Image (cartoon, rainbow, N blue to C red):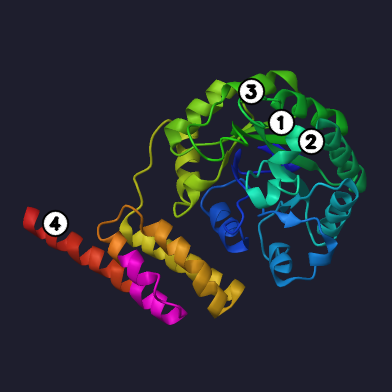
């Protein structure tokens, strides 16, 4: 797929998720089938550029290109500066966050709160596009502030007029948070109104749902977020289904164990052992969700603070799964 001057393996995008889409997760999703991954949002406050958190979020060493970095803020000048800073740090695409519904973001009129102020949206987009004229700028937003004010069509037109090169739309309003079901009619409407690529996002959890959303919206691509937490192979499953119409077999527990082990190694290396162990707990929980005995395992895992203890417990859990599978197979035979 050709996208903003880059050749992507497909039209499947990893949604930016705070605390999730760090470099290890982005690299893993790309390895397992995603065409592009957007970083977790980076603040536009220059006072925080030197913080350890911001430096990690701007770290793209060894990452498969293109590098897409999301910035968040409400001040046009600061957003322009943030765009230039991240391009200098290696960003090849600058994405603007107008989709995050979190209170701590919206309370400072950033994220999806910006959708309430269309003139400010235009000023921000214009400032960022002009700040990095040689770098594509994209925008992620929601269908509206609430269900009575679904102004995504207006925001999309503003974005196109300002020179934004592509947009991604989450099929919920800010008021919906992540509750209820995503709706795709608004995304389909936007697709008929603009000439730039439109990426559909929200509740894309299976290969079949992916095909439905593509057909319903006629979008140029799909953005997948929470459904890939603990299931990064979802991208290869969707890609295979869209290209062949057939479903790949679910990964075995042995493969899940191997993928998780590799992910943990990257987390420990990226964050260091102490912070890496804290970050790892939620990922281990996501990977093991739905496996027999996982609830008890996750409770015990949450008490472990050392890398070695986490790895040992993870290995023991998956080895016990393999042993139980052998017993069941032998009994059935």
| Residue neighbourhood size for the residue with mark 4, other residues' Cα within 10 Å, grouped as few (<14), some (14–19), many (≥20) | few
Query: Pointer 1: what residue?
Result: 197
Given contact means CB atoms under 8 Å apart, are the residues at marks 4 and 3 in contact? Answer: no
Given contact means CB atoms under 8 Å apart, are the residues at marks 4 and 1 in contact? Answer: no
**In the image, is 92 to the left or to the right of 25?**
right
Query: Pointer 3: what residue?
Result: 148
Where residue 244 sits, quadrant-wise, is top left
Element at label 1: loop
| Residue neighbourhood size for the residue with mark 1, other residues' Cα within 10 Å, grouped as few (<14), some (14–19), many (≥20) | some
Query: Pointer 4: what residue?
Result: 329
Q: CA distance from mark 1 to mark 2?
A: 7 Å
Which is nearer the N-term, disc 3 or disc 1? 3
Which is nearer the N-term, disc 1 or disc 2? 2
Q: Residue at x 63, y 48 (%)?
A: 102
Q: Position of residue 47 (x, y in %)?
A: 83, 66
Q: CA distance from mark 4 to mark 3?
A: 56 Å
Given contact means CB atoms under 8 Å apart, are the residues at marks 1 and 2 in contact? Answer: yes
Query: Pointer 2: what residue?
Result: 165
Q: Is residue 270 magenta?
A: no
Q: Residue at x 88, y 50 (%)?
A: 80
Q: Nearer the viewer, residue 63 or 53?
A: 53
Which is nearer the N-term, disc 4 or disc 2? 2
Where residue 19 sits, quadrant-wise, is bottom right
**In the image, is 222 to the left or to the right of 88?**
left
Q: Is residue 333 visible?
A: no
Q: CA distance from mark 4 to mark 1?
A: 49 Å
* Span highlighted in magenta in the image: 297-314
Element at label 4: helix
Q: Position of residue 46 (x, y in %)?
A: 84, 62
| Label of residue 151 in the image | none
């Amino acid at each position: 797929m050709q996208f903003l001057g880059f050749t992507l393996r497909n039209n499947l995008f990893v949604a930016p998720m705070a605390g999730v889409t760090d470099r290890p997760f982005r690299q893993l999703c790309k390895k397992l089938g995603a065409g592009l991954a957007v970083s977790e949002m980076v603040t536009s406050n220059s006072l925080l550029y030197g913080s350890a958190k911001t430096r990690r979020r701007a770290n793209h060493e060894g990452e498969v290109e293109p590098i897409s970095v999301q910035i968040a803020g409400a001040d046009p000048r600061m957003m322009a500066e943030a765009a230039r800073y991240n391009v200098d740090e290696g960003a090849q695409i600058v994405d603007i966050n107008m989709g995050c519904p979190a209170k701590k973001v919206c309370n400072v009129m950033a994220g999806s709160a910006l959708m309430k102020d269309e003139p400010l949206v235009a000023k921000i987009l214009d400032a960022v596009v002009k700040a990095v004229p040689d770098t594509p700028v994209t925008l992620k937003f929601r269908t509206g502030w609430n269900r009575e004010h679904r102004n995504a069509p207006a925001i999309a037109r503003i974005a196109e007029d300002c020179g934004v090169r592509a947009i991604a739309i989450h099929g919920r309003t800010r008021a919906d948070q992540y509750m209820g079901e995503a709706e795709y009619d608004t995304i389909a409407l936007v697709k008929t109104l603009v000439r730039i690529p439109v990426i559909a996002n929200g509740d894309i959890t299976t290969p079949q749902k992916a095909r439905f959303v593509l057909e319903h919206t006629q979008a140029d691509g799909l953005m997948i977020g929470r459904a890939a937490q603990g299931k990064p192979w979802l991208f290869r499953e969707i890609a295979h289904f869209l290209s062949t119409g057939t479903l790949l077999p679910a990964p075995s527990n042995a493969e899940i164990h191997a993928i998780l082990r590799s992910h943990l190694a990257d987390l420990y290396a990226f964050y260091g052992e102490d912070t890496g162990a804290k970050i790892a707990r939620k990922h281990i929980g996501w990977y093991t969700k739905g496996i027999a005995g996982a609830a008890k395992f996750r409770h015990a895992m949450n008490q472990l603070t050392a890398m070695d203890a986490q790895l040992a417990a993870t290995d023991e859990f998956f080895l016990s799964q393999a042993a139980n599978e052998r017993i069941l197979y032998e009994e059935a035979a």
